[in-house]
Amino acid sequence: MIMYKYAKDAKFFLLWGSLCVLANILLTFGNSYDGDQSFWVGWVQQLMDGGFGNFKGNYPPLYVFWLWVVAQVHTIFGIAVGKTFLLKFICLWPVYFSHLFLVDWLCRFTGKFGGPQWRRHLLIGFVALNPAILLNGPIWGQVDMLPVLLAMLSIYCISRPGKIKYASMFFVLSVLTKFQMIMFLPVFGGLFLRHWRISWKGLPFALLGAVVVLLPFTISGNLVRMLTNAYVQTSSQYPYATFNGANLWMLLAGNATPDNVPIWGVKDFGLGFLLKPSVLGRVLFVAVSLLVLVKSLFCRSVRTAYALCTLNAVAFFVVLPGMHERYLLYAVPAALCWAVWDIRRGGIFCLLVTLVASMNVNFINTFKGHYAWVVASSIGCIALVAMIVVIAFPKISSKAVSAVSRVTLPFYAVYIALLVILLVECGDLLYQNRPVKPPLDDKNVLLTSLPVVREYQGYKMPRINESVDGRLLTSGDRLYKNGIGTHAPSQIAYELPENADTLYLGAGIDDEVYDRGQARFSVKLDGVIVWESPTLRGRDNPVFTTIPVRGGRHLELLTDPDGDDNSDHADWLNAYLKLR
């Protein structure tokens, strides 16, 4: 790796590395894509229940190692796995470090290449705050930065005789993290053949890396199933011309059109089958890949290699069928590397690829959510105060900036700062997400252990210890081990034991509806309302109460939608009776 030769270059990285870390952490508070988070929940639960041998997901093995770590954290702290901010936050640790490393790595080369300082700031700022990377990673909750970074490192190493022995290992690890990295094989393969006299020396490192990654699955007897799920079955999982991907087939066939339907209404006879997306798309991609392979065989510079990577990654997304909205993201880091080595030609393509990738991801999962408002509001307030200080007190602000610029820190201070932030935030989240349990002893009895005398619900049925949609009970970002998931309006009636003295319970809107939904909760004792909640809305903290029930016989828990009943997922939390 090119090292920082001057302190000013290290400070340059400290600035943009810090902003990269800040952007990643803050944007994580946006709502993740719900469907994909369900996969993370299922896979982590599988690893909690039976380790690598129990993993049934269709994800390649390297990142499963980190999911195993996530599973151990939940197990050690006794936290149930759910679609919580904690799960998203821990799952994204490799993304935070991958993005920071990309900034660090490209900072070193911009320092070596020189050029105007303003252009360097614009270029690295675009890497650190790239909207496509941020929308896909910290906001969406995907980990695509990790495999594509490994792929870009493999291209760099295969182009440098002194580092070529590591190239095959990086490439193999990238494919073991995400199968889509095969899109860079024509570039890597062409460069490997070009330098075949020394590139083969890296094969033992590649073999060692593959053995280490696959060993836990081999020992647990799950290797064949894992490889089949991750590399064979996924290729036919979405047989559509395009699956929310803004590419050629969106124009010619339409979204979610079967990939065996001929475009332009051509009938399936003669050579008409060639116009099916499943055939024509593959033919077009193979043609581009062959061109890239040939060019790679004669490639003499890293800049050309990254240009070819960008070309094939764009072709992978634009012409292949079955593309998802996120799959153009793989072209973004390649285009960023190209722009660093060749700003005149790579810069414009970097902007275009980022624009399309950002728009495509944003169509499906925008930056939104309760905490997103907090983040945006806080940034606006801080910016206002900072501008007031700079304009009203220019001398003081100049002295402050000068004092900060004189502080000398090693470049790795940003990595240490990121790790500290992650550990502190993780500790706080672990404390907040510790399972909330009702106190149980001989004098306390769970309300859910009593037989239900009567129940009514306008949508679905009440569920014990689960939300109405069958997920873990979560309200106010806290998990609850015990409770009842309902949907307003609802009514649940119990017959109280004779020695019942006091009822303790909580009420709140389940977090599965995010910031939607609202309801009012009430409790009746022998037909008389003895407690009512205010109107509670999505993301409000639940309310808890203590109700004397001595002498009472009939208890009713009621929820009212308080207007529209859309998304009124109302939870009764940790309800228990204290006995005399």
Image (tube, rainbow, N blue to C red):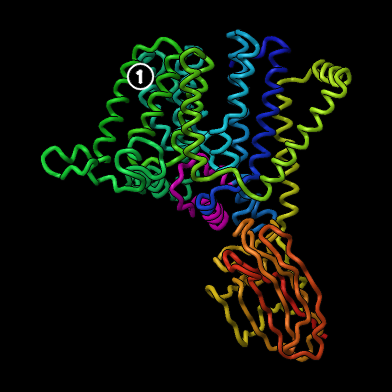
User: From the viewer's perspective, is 94 left or right of 161?
Assistant: right
Q: Nearer the viewer, residue 457 or 76?
A: 457
> In this figure, which residue is indicated by the disc labeled 1?
190
Residue 227 location, x and y as percent?
40, 44
At 71% from the left and 59% from the top, the residue drawn is: 540
Residue 445 location, x and y as percent?
73, 79
User: In this picture, is 464 found above or below 15?
Assistant: below
Residue 556 visible within the image:
yes
At 39% from the left and 34% from the top, the residue drawn is: 317
Toward which corner of the image does residue 8 lie, by quadrant? top right
Toward which corner of the image does residue 508 lie, by quadrant? bottom right
User: From the viewer's perspective, is 147 left or right of 549?
Assistant: left
Residue that extends furthest to the left in the rendered view of this protein: 270
* Image quadrant containing the C terminus: bottom right
The amino acid type, in three-letter code, at marker 1 is: Gly
Toward which corner of the image does residue 535 lie, by quadrant? bottom right
Looking at the rendering, the stretch of residues picked out in magenta corresponds to: 39-68
Residue 173 visible within the image:
no
User: From the viewer's perspective, is 223 left or right of 163?
Assistant: left
At 40% from the left and 29% from the top, the residue drawn is: 314
Q: Nearer the viewer, residue 233 or 518?
A: 518
Q: Secondary structure at mark 1?
A: helix
